[in-house]
Structures are given as structure tokens and as C-alpha cells.
Image (spheres, rainbow, N blue to C red):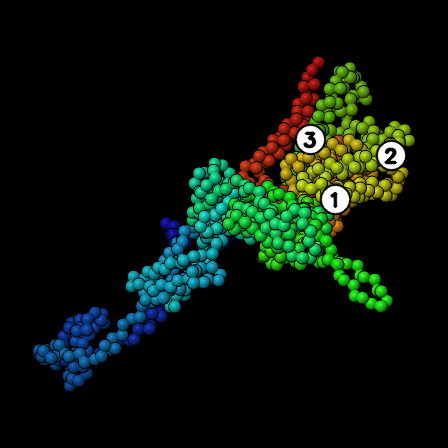
Amino acid sequence: MRGFTSDVSPPVRPRGSRRLVSVAAVAALAVLLLSAAGLIGAAPPATASPPPPGASASAFAASGSTAASGSTAVHSSAASSAAASFSSGSGSSPASAAARPAAVPTPSAVSPTDTSSPSDTPTPTPTPSPVSIDRLPDLVRSFPLAVSGTATPTDTISVSAGSSPGSAQSCTATVDDDGDWRCTLASLPDGPGVSVRAESTLSGSDSARVDVLHPPVIAGTGVVSTGGSVRGTAYPGASVTVTADTGASCTFPVDANGGWACVLSGSLPDGRHTVTATQTAPFSSQSSAASGRVTIDVDRTAPAAPGITSPPSGTSVLAGTAVAFGGTGETGAHVTLYATTAQGTTVVCTADVAAGAWSCQGALPEGAYTLSALQRDAAGNVSAGSNAVTLGVTAATTPSTPSPTRTPTPTPTPAVPVPPAAGGGTGAGPLHPDTRGWIATPFSNASAPVVTAASLPGWMRSVGLAVAALLLLVLPARLLTAALARGRAARADRERRRVSVFGRNRPRSDVAEASALFGAAARSERARTGHNGDAVPSSPSVRAQPRWLVPVVGIAAAVLVTLSTPLSDPGAYLRVLLAIGIAVAAVNAVWVLAGRALAPHFGLPVPRITVRPELLVVVAVAAFGSRLLGLSPALLFALVLGLSMAPHAGRARRGRIAAVQISAVAALGVLAWLAVGLLPTPTGAFTAFLVELVNALALIGIGSASVMLLPLGGLAGRAVAQWSRWLWGGLSLVVYTVLFALLLPVASLVERGVGVIVIVGVAAGFAAASVAVWLWERYVAPALDRTVP
């Protein structure tokens, strides 16, 4: 019969395990025997004393056994008395002792008075019980948290939570007589695996780990005025959902600093409503408890336009002199006063409206200004512009000091405006942090790339988006175009295929390589197109294009790129158009110079530059698509020049030249993007122009390289893919990763619930349809053609 042990581990029987088990069993038995022998040998040896006189052997044995048991004090004392009488006897022989009648004990002998102290019989000290914590919930959502457990009675237990516990994360409890203890933690830090420790003064400590998630916090106290937006704080990386009493809701991710804000969508009429918020953290699928209810006052009605009553229109003041401005507005609103000249717009001063009136002071440099004001109410609604007031500012002249030599009077210098006081609405400030004396544009709001440990999740997201774009958009598009081209070729050659007899007369589509992704084009197309798809004439001489075509197409491309982003001021349009025009020229110059410089190294003649007006369609699609989708920054493309390669260039040389051209344009964009971080913050129209130029170079360079990498039609990516698919894949992954890192703010557009589902669904549907068409044209259609007689 097999023996069983309490070991519940899976049976493992290595080779020779039977002998090892036997040896282990023998060793364990030996240890047990030695332990028993040690326990027996530790007891004091028994003395073979003769029975006392007058006591029978049985009585002596009984008294000895009773004394040995130690059950009662009376028996112990009786045994002691018997031993004492035996030791004090006359030493009679056992026979005489047996013949002598047993002495009847006196009452004092039967019940002797115990004069020993209580310390003569020590009480055993109880063994301390180890402290332990009862099971805690997997996710702590409500507070305070009750922590309980067991330990030694009367012991003191100190409980704490987190790495740096404070008073709210600590408590102390005393163990009751039953060995139980319990205390309450007022709060715990949010996060996964928060440690809860219980420390005993007698028996060590115990710990457990729990996930903790507090409810999010909605910012604001009392009644919060809003236009429908709600903001607050929560656990970084969590997703917050806000719900109003009407059912309107919104969901938004929490940034790395713990901040979030979203606009309620759904039925939310103007008036007072209550809202609550919950959050779901990445470490748990459960949501937190709901936050406290907050009352919001929804106001989506823009306030009326403010009025400027002082100074009167047409007033003239000295430069640098503080001027008092005033007017009317909506009580509680915030008024901003602007001054506009031909050079731009600046903020003069700001003020809060009290009792329907506002006032502030400001100073302006020399010039002719048009004053206007806007007001923003407590809910964030902005009014229309106020009435326009003209103001003339003249230079303050400095009187000359008379001198005998008639020294000329110094030229008066315009007074330098005083910077605005920090936090004040009255100060004379020529520049505002938002406008700085010029109209800001999306091209002047640039952000340099960040390569730190904290930015690693953003770069990983860019890599993921690049891979998704290649798998769901670029490669399926290539499959679709290849399938459609194959279908057209098959239909055009169907008649000739029916009468073909010899293999040498079979159509090109049957004998050429039909690669799924990047199959070689027909010989006629390779002879007709260059490495970028640029037309190559059959004769050595290339037909000359009119010279006016280059500037016309270049200006058209610059205008289309400028229209990709809405601008609010005509002057800003001209400045941005100039910056984009220079950027377009630079990107096209790098494109053609890289190809012309590399061609001689491959034994090819220097290719001729050609204008490709048909690419204006791609420029327009990228520009207006970015504007319609609200992409900021926009996805831009502006390559309208190409090179006419020699017909005998070959696939390898065309692919290498195309790869170098794409890499050069992408490198120009990356260098410009890095330069954004080196430029100072714009303080005027010129510095703003520099930032806009560098930002335009980055957007156009990286965007143009990304579009040119598409292995479609006459784009350069097709030449690279036909030469080396692996090089095309690696280059595409790098360029598209940089592209999505540059367009990283656009990713927030798809983080709002159903938007990402729609985009992924459309991309997946396009990929599935493209693969289906390719499979049909690649396998099904040829099989059907072969079955037709």
C-alpha cells in the first residue's frame, strides 16, 4: 500500500529516486529516534528509594505515580511527606516494616499547611503569536480602509501604507484577549501594488499589497460657470468619464501631470446641472468610485460686445505716456484691449468688469493705432469686437540744450514702453505673451522633438502608428494598384492570348513577375518612366519645357500649402506665404540636387530637371485634407520637380538614386525640426518669420518624404521598392515614425472614444478590400480565363 504525505507539489521522479527516497526515509527515522532519545535522557534519573516504614508497596507505588503525574498539590505534598518519613526512619528492615502496623496519620499529617510562596510553582510563559493581516480587497475604491488581523493578545500593532506614509496612511491598534486587532487607514496612495504593512512590538511584521484608485477630482468650488467643459485631476494615464444629470457625458485621457479636461456632449441645456466623474486606471479593469457631485452653470451664450468710451476717437497722446482707457461691459467678464497698426496687433491692457464698467491704463510707442476690445465671460464665451477707436501716438521731443557752437538737437527717440506688471491688468506693456506685437499663426507655434525617458511612450506610439499605416494603408494600396493594373493588362491582351500558340507570343502579364507588393513594371513602362516616374522621351533629346512653368508651379504649390491652415489676418497670410515659398524652393532644390549629384557616380549622365504639374493634385489633396480634418500641424507635400533619367539606367541605379533623394529631403526636415528648439521665442514679426520658415521646412520636408515613399504610380517609393523591398521597409518605418512624432498632437484627435474606432475600421476595411481585389485578380481571374475556351 502506497504511503501518502502532506506534500501537494507535483510528483517528480528523477532517475534513481527510489534509492534516494529510501535513504531519506532511513535518515528521517534516525533523526526521530535520536530526538526521542535526547528527550528521554534529559529527564532526571529516578532514585530507587525503599518505601517508608508502615507503607505498603502498593501505596508507595501509587503515591509515587501520583506525585509523578503532578496533577494536584495534595498528592505532591503527600508524596513528599512519605519520602520524608522514610528518610527519617530507624532503618528497619523491610520485613519488620511489613509486620509493623501502618501508622494512622494525624490530621496535620494528612493536610499539612502549605507555607511555600507562589513562586515555588512557576506559570509557563505563552508563546507570542505571529502578527498577520486578513485578506484585503484586490482594488481599494472606498475610504477609509479597515485593516484587521491576528497577533499576540495585549500586543500593539502599527499599520502603514505606501512608501512615505503620513498620518492619513497610518494607524495603531491593540490586540484584544482573543488575539484580534483592527484599525482604519484614512487614505492610501493611488497606484498598483501599494504595500500595507503591520508591525508588532513582540512578534515581527506582516505585509500585503493592494491596488488603490481614488475617485477623480472635479476642479472648482461652489457653482462652476462653464460653457460645457469640465476639468480636474486624476491618476496619470487613466481615462476619466464625466456624466451629467441629463445623461450628457464625455471621456478623456489624463495627462502625465494628472490633469484632464473634456467637453460634455449630448443633451445639456443652459442652466445649472450636477456632474460626477469616474476613472479607469491602466492597472485595473474596474472603475473607481464616483466623485463628489459638483454643480456647474452652463452658459453657451456669448456676451455682448464691450464698449470703449475713453479716450474719444481721434485723440492724440505722447509716446510712453500712460493713457487711461475705459468702457462698458458685462459684470464679471474680463476685457482685453487691443491696439492694431500696419505692423501687427498688441495688447494694451486688461481689466475685469465691475458694475458694468471697466478701466485700465497702458502706454504705446509712436504710431497710429485702432483700438478694439473683447470680453470673455466666466463661462469662457468670447464676445464680438467692440467699437473701433482711433488713437494717435506722437514721439516725445527732448529739448536741446543751448550752446555757443549751435550743437544740433539730438534726434528724438521713441519712448520704450513699460513692461506690464505681473498679474495686473493695468500696466503699460507693448507685447502680450500670446501676440507679441504680431499675429501668431500655427506655423509660429512649433515644438522641438524631445528625446528623453519620459518621452519614450510617445515615440513608441509613433512607431506603432507607423507600423499600422504601413500594414493597413500603404501595402494594401500597393496591392490594389498592382491588381488593377494586372486586370487592365489581362483584359487588353485577352484576344491575343486566345490566338497565341507559342510561348514567345504570350502576353507580358503572364511571363513577367507578378509580385504581390512590388512586382516589376512592364518593360515599356520602365522605358517610358524615370526612377521617380518622370517621363523619359524615346529620343535622347528631352523636349524643353517653358521657363515660366517653374515659377508658376512653385508659386501654386506654395499657395496651396499656405491654404492648409486657416489664418485670421491678411498680413499674417503674406508673411506665412513668403516663409512657405522659401521652404518649397529649398525642399525641391535638395530633391533635384541630390539626384543630379549622385547620378554621375553610377555612370549616368547628369539628369535634366523637369517640372511635374500633375503633382499639384497631390499638393492640393494633402493641404485641403489637412484643413478639412483640422490637422495641426498639417500633413504637407510640395515636391513638384523631377529628374529625367536615361532609359538604360536600370532598376538598381534608379532605386539607389530615389532612396538618396528621399533620405536627403527627410534629413532636411529633421534638421529643421531640431533647429526649432534652438530658435528663441518670437518677439516680433521678423523672429516670427524665422520660426515659421524653419517650421515650414520641417513639415514640408518630412511630409514630402513620407508621400514620396508610397510605392504607387510615378512616386519615388516605387523605384526603391522594386530595387530593395527591405530597404524600402526600413526607410518607410523610420520616416513614418518621425512623421507621426511630428504630428503627435494629431493623435489626440483619435483618443476621444468612437473616433479611433471609426478610423481603425475604415483602415481595416480598406486593407481587406484591397487584399480581396488582389486575390481575385491574382488567382481567381486567371483561373476563370483558362477555363474559357
Is residue 649 visible to us here?
no
Q: Which mark is residue 575?
A: 1
User: Which element carries disc 2, helix, strand or loop?
Assistant: loop
- Residue 216 at x, y = what percent? 47, 49
Q: Residue at x 85, y 34 (%)?
A: 548
Q: Which mark is residue 547?
A: 2
Q: Nearer the viewer, residue 172 or 544?
A: 544
Amino acid at the residue labelled 1? Arg
Pointer 3 residue:
479
What is the quadrant of residue 552 in the picture?
top right
Q: Residues within 10 Å of mark 1 (few under 14, many from 20)?
A: some
Residue at the top extreme, as displayed: 789
Q: Which mark is nearer the camera, 3 or 1? A: 1
Q: Which mark is residue 751?
A: none
Image quadrant holding the C terminus, namely: top right
Q: Residue at x 15, y 86 (%)?
A: 90
**Distance (Cα) linking label 1 and label 2:** 26 Å
Q: Which mark is nearer the camera, 1 or 2? A: 1
Q: How many labels sit on residues?
A: 3
Answer with mark 3 or mark 1, whichever residue precedes in sequence: 3
